[in-house]
Image (cartoon, grey):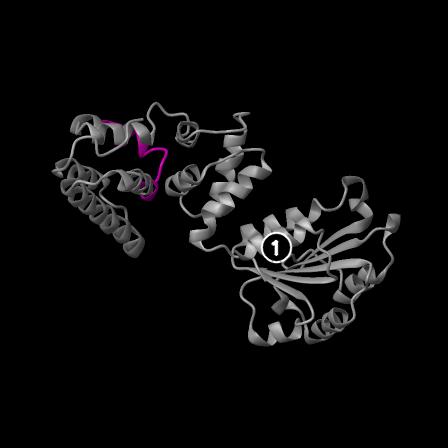
C-alpha cells in the first residue's frame, strides 16, 4: 500500500530532505497534509511549519521566496517543514527550474514536501529522482487495512470482518468512510461491534441493515419490503447490496452440503448482476426486484446469520 509507505515515513519523522507525494484522490492529499502537520508541536508551527497552496488564486508567494524560506535556519534548533501543495504543472518554466535546483541541493535542516494532485508523468519522475516519491492512492482491496489504521488513530479497535462490513455499507469513498469512523469514535468505546457500526451508520433510524437480512432469513416478504422502505432514506442501494454480499460471504466456510452451495451460488450471482448493473449504467436499481428474487430462491433454512 503506497499510503502505508507514507505512514512508515511519518513514523520515522520524515527523515529525508525532499518528498514528492502525489495522489488522484484529494482526500488523501489532505490526510497526508494533516499527518505532516502533526509532526510539528503546536507551539512551534508558526515558525517551523509552512504551507503554500499553488491551487489558490490568493497565494502570492513565489517559488523563489518559498525556497529562500526553506534555506533559512529553523527556530528552536529543529527542522523546518515546508509544504508546497497543488498541481506542479501550474508552475512557470522559471519556477520549475528554481524548484528543480533546490531538489538537487536541498537544505539539510528543512523537510521540503511537495503534494502534487494527479499522476506523475515520466519527465516529472526524472526531474524529481533525488526526492522520495510516494504515490498515495489506495487500491480498493487495501481499503479494509486503511479503515483499521484510521480507526486505531481514533483509539478504536476494528476487526477484519468489521472493516469489510463498513466498506460494504458505505462504499469505497475514503472521505465518507473517514466521516463514519469519526462518528463511531464518538461512542466512546475502545472496541466496537458490527451492531454498533450498523446502528450509527444507519443514521439513528428505527431499522438497520441487520433487520433487513433477518427478514430475508425468515423469508418474510412483507417485512423485507417495509424495512427496505425505511432504510432507503438513509442508505444507498449499492451500500445495501454490499452489506448483503458481506453477510452471505460469511456463510461460505460453514456450508458444506450441496444444496447450500447451490443456494449461495445463486445468491452471489443475483448480487453480482445487481452490482454490475448499478456501476455500468449509473442509474437507480430496482432494489425491490432484487429483494423479491432473493426471497424466491429455494435454499437451506438459516442461510443468513441472525442479528
185, above or below 26, in the image? above
Q: In terms of depth relative to the viewer, which is nearer, 146 or 112?
A: 146
Q: Nearer the viewer, residue 6 or 177?
A: 6
Residue 6 lies in the magenta stretch: no
Q: Mark yes or no: residue 164 visible.
A: yes
Classify residue 199 as left or right of residue 248. Answer: right
Identify which residue is drawn at 55% across, 25% down.
Answer: 188
Taking 184 as reference, is 115 above or below it?
A: below
Residue 78 locus on image (x, y percent): 84, 51
The percent coordinates of residue 50 (x first, y second) are: 75, 52
The percent position of residue 135, horizontal first and vertical second, equals 56, 61
Mark 1, other Cα within 10 Å: few <14 / some 14–19 / many ≥20: many
Q: Which residues are magenta?
A: 225-239
Instruction: State the image coordinates of residue 41 (x, y, percent, origin top left).
Output: 77, 42
What residue is rendered at 54% in x and 63% in y? 118
Query: Which residue has dot 1 on it?
Result: 6
| SS of the residue under disc 1 | helix
Which residue does the image show at 68% across and 76% down from the upper left? 93
Amino acid at each position: 500500500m503506497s499510503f502505508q509507505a507514507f505512514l512508515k515515513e511519518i513514523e520515522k519523522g520524515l527523515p529525508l530532505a525532499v518528498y514528492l507525494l502525489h495522489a488522484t484522490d484529494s482526500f488523501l492529499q489532505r490526510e497526508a497534509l494533516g499527518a505532516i502537520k502533526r509532526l510539528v508541536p503546536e507551539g512551534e508551527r508558526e515558525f517551523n511549519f509552512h504551507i503554500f497552496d499553488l491551487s489558490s488564486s490568493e497565494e502570492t508567494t513565489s517559488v523563489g521566496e518559498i525556497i529562500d524560506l526553506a534555506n533559512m535556519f529553523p527556530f528552536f534548533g529543529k527542522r523546518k517543514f515546508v509544504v508546497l501543495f497543488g498541481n506542479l504543472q501550474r508552475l512557470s518554466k522559471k519556477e520549475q527550474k528554481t524548484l528543480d535546483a533546490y531538489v538537487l541541493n536541498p537544505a539539510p535542516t528543512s523537510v521540503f514536501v511537495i503534494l502534487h494532485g494527479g499522476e506523475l508523468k515520466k519527465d516529472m519522475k526524472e526531474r524529481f529522482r533525488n526526492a522520495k516519491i510516494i504515490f498515495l492512492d489506495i487500491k480498493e482491496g487495501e481499503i479494509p487495512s486503511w479503515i483499521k489504521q484510521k480507526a486505531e488513530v481514533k483509539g478504536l479497535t476494528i476487526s477484519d470482518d468489521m472493516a469489510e462490513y463498513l466498506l460494504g455499507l458505505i462504499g469505497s469513498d475514503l472521505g465518507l468512510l473517514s466521516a463514519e469512523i469519526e462518528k463511531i469514535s464518538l461512542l466512546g468505546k475502545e472496541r466496537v461491534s458490527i451492531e454498533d457500526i450498523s446502528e450509527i451508520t444507519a443514521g439513528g433510524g428505527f431499522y438497520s441493515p441487520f433487520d433487513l437480512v433477518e427478514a430475508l432469513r425468515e423469508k418474510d416478504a412483507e417485512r423485507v419490503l417495509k424495512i427496505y422502505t425505511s432504510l432507503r432514506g438513509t442508505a444507498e442501494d449499492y451500500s445495501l447490496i454490499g452489506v448483503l454480499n458481506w453477510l452471505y460471504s460469511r456463510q461460505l466456510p460453514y456450508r458444506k452440503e450441496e444444496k447450500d452451495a447451490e443456494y449461495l451460488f445463486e445468491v452471489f450471482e443475483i448480487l453480482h448482476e445487481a452490482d454490475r448493473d448499478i456501476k455500468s449504467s449509473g442509474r437507480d436499481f430496482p432494489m425491490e426486484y432484487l429483494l423479491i428474487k432473493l426471497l424466491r430462491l429455494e435454499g437451506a433454512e438459516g442461510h443468513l446469520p441472525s442479528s
